Structures are given as C-alpha cells and as structure tokens.
Image (spheres, rainbow, N blue to C red):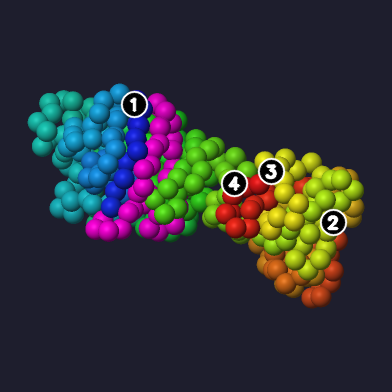
Amino acid sequence: MATVSVRNISVAFGGTKVIQNLSLDVREGEFIVLLGPSGCGKSTLLNSVAGLQEIDEGQIWIGGKNVTWEEPKDRGIGMVFQSYALYPRMTVEQNLSFGLRMARVDRGEIQRRVSKAAQILQIQPLLKRRPGELSGGQRQRVAIGRALVRDAEVFLFDEPLSNLDAKLRTELRVEIKKLHQALGSTMIYVTHDQIEALTLADRIAVMHHGVIQQLAAPKEIYRQPLNRFVAGFVGSPSMNFLKGNLETSNGEPAFRLSEGNLLRLDGYAFKSFEQGKPAVLGLRPEQILLRENPAGCTALPIKFVVDEPMGADTLIWGNVGKELISTRVGPDQCFAPGDTLEAHFIASQSSIFDAESGDRI
C-alpha cells in the first residue's frame, strides 16, 4: 500500500487548460473515485498519476517518493483500462504472465502470482482459453488480473466497466469492492457513472472544468453538495431546483418562490443569510414527502403531471409554479392529472444555493 499525492499540477493541450492547479491527497489503502462528465479532466489526472501524461506544472508523489519524471513502469502502479487490450493469440494465463516474463521475473514467482490473481478473480477455469472465447465480463476480469500480478502498491482504473451491459456492471462493481477489501490496496478509479462512484468510493472527487468541486465521502457528497453543479450531477433523477429569494417570516428565515409562495426554512444551517438575496432551493426526490401534515415540515403544493412506475417505487412529476419537479412515492399511490398534492419537506435536509455563484449558502 502507498499514499498518492498530487501537488498543484496543471495540464494543457495547446491553449486549452485541462487541469488547473489541482491538488489531491489519497490516503494509504483508500479507494478514491474521480467522478465527472466527459471532458472534465478526470482521465487526464489519472494518466498523469500513471506517468502516461506529462504535466506542465506541479509534482506527483507515490509512496513518499517524487515520481513526477519517472517512467510508468517505475511508479509501482497497476493500471486497468477501459478497453481490455488483451493479446488475442495468447491464452488467459499467457496474458496474465506476459509483463512478468518481459521483466524476466523468476518462473516460479510468475506461476505463484498468476495463480493468486486467478484465485482472487475466480478465473482459474479460464486460464487455457483465449480472449475470443470469453465474455466481456470475463475479459475485464483478466484485464484486472494483469494489473494484480504486478503486486503494485497503487491500482488505477480508467472507466473499466463502461463497455459492459448493466447486469455485468453491477456484478463487477461488487467484485471490485470485494477486491479492494481483500487487498487493502490504494485505488483510484475514474468514472462518469455516479452509481459506481457512490457504491465503490471511500471518498469521491467530483470534477468539472479541470477543478475538483468537492472531495468527500459519498453520503456527504449526496446530502450536502457544496455547489449546484455537484448537487445536479450526483443523484438519479437529479436534485430538483426551485428559484426564488431569501426572506424572513416572523423573524425566521424563509424562501419566497418565484411564483409567490413563502416556504419556511426552520432548522436550515445557513453559512450566510442575506435578506432578498436571489437563491435556489434544492430538494432531492426522496426529500419531498407526500403525506398529510408531517410534524416539523414545510408545505410545498405540487400539481401532478405524470408518473413513472419503477417497480419498488414510483416517480411522480409535478409542477411547482412553472418548475417541473420529481418525488418518490410508494408503488401503489395513484393520482389524476391536475391533482394538487399535499407535499412537504424538512428544511434542514434541503440545500440552498446562491443563484449567481451556485455555491451552497
């Protein structure tokens, strides 16, 4: 196991800055997920750690050693790519051992490492097969195994599940989590899939425009996003956003919706409060409660539009003024188009953002 420290790095392609003065410290044995949309710089950051991408400024440290100008093979890393990149004419066993053979590792040691990796990934029956005889999930296991046999201190994953179907992605997510628990190795994982991030990570680094917007545990990212971008990117369906202004009612903070309704904000922990400030109220679908007058809640009238049955629950879509929002209800609740729903929310669980900067207030 080893720590990884990214210190004030910048990367530009021509005149385009992809990463800007970014720092990130990964603790020993930690599973960090780099999450963000395409073009946010997450793969560039991973490739910089791996030594596959030169940086313009800053330093990369792995295991307490400055590896900024070290070759990838000398950084003590194992990398798993989005493409399997297996040699089609070699067997699984030969694919796993190829790098070790090229490095002239002792034959007995090669056999021990391949056997151990095959056991961990449960691919012993596949060792004599070629890649063309394997499913996509089996090929990705072999690709992971090829990194495992290096006995690396740090493992880097670049969207390894994006080429798989939904069922296989779910299965391999569980396997990767079990792998991390078994090895206890430091892992950095790149994905644009928020479900992968929330289920795998010890901490998530949400990236946008080459900058880490928030670095925190999955629950904190989900419940207390630092800005509107993080709030909107993490969560499916996305957080609901209602525009309005901050006001006071009987000396207590409140939120005036753009269509006029005044919502109490009892118990909300403001970082700052400014009377009349344009703001955005953020509510996740499950934070909107469709039941009569729950204690300590704020009323939010919703005019029902359409529902989406999803098996275990139903997603309800309705209008608050001109804004379309969603909420989750039980699978047996039914409404007619145009119904006004008695909805409520707990203000302390909501998120409020500055309308101009997008920062959490």
Residue 17 on the magenta span? yes
Q: Give the residue pinned by disc 2.
A: 299
- Tell me, yes or no, whether the two marked residues, 3 and 2, touch with CB atoms within 8 Å: no
Task: Look at 44% across and 42% down and name the residue there.
Answer: 33
Pointer 3 with pointer 1, Cβ within 8 A = no
Which is more foreground, mark 4 or mark 1?
Answer: 4
Structural distance between the alpha carbons of marks 4 and 3? 16 Å
x and y, in percent, of residue 52 in the image: 22, 45
Q: Residues within 10 Å of mark 3 (few under 14, many from 20)?
A: few
User: Residues in magenta?
Assistant: 13-42
Q: Position of residue 328 (x, y in %)?
A: 72, 57
As measured in the structure, the alpha-carbon distance from the residue carrying label 4 to the one carrying label 1 is 29 Å
Say which of 241 and 354 sits in front. 354
Q: Give how far across and how far down residue 125 sits, in percent.
A: 30, 42
Per the image, the residue denoted by label 4 is: 225
Q: Amino acid at mark 1?
A: Ala
Q: Amino acid at mark 3?
A: Ser
On the image, the x and y values in percent for residue 116 come to 29, 30
* Residue labelled with disc 1: 2
User: Looking at numbered disc 2 in the image, what kind of residue is underneath it?
Assistant: Ala
Q: Earlier in the sequence, mark 4 or mark 3?
A: 4
**Quarter-of-image position of residue 176:** top left
Q: Which of 287 and 167 lies nearest the eye of the viewer?
A: 287
Choose mark 3 or mark 1, whichever is in front: 3
CA–CA distance between discs 3 and 2? 24 Å
Given this view, does label 2 or label 1 mark the residue nearer the observer? 2
Is 182 displayed left or right of 50 in the figure?
Answer: right
The local crowd at label 2, few if under 14, some if 14 to 19, many if 20 or more residues have their Cα within 10 Å, is many
Residue beneath disc 3: 272
Does residue 172 show up?
Answer: no
Q: Residue at x 31, y 45 (%)?
A: 10
Foreground pick, 269 / 196: 269
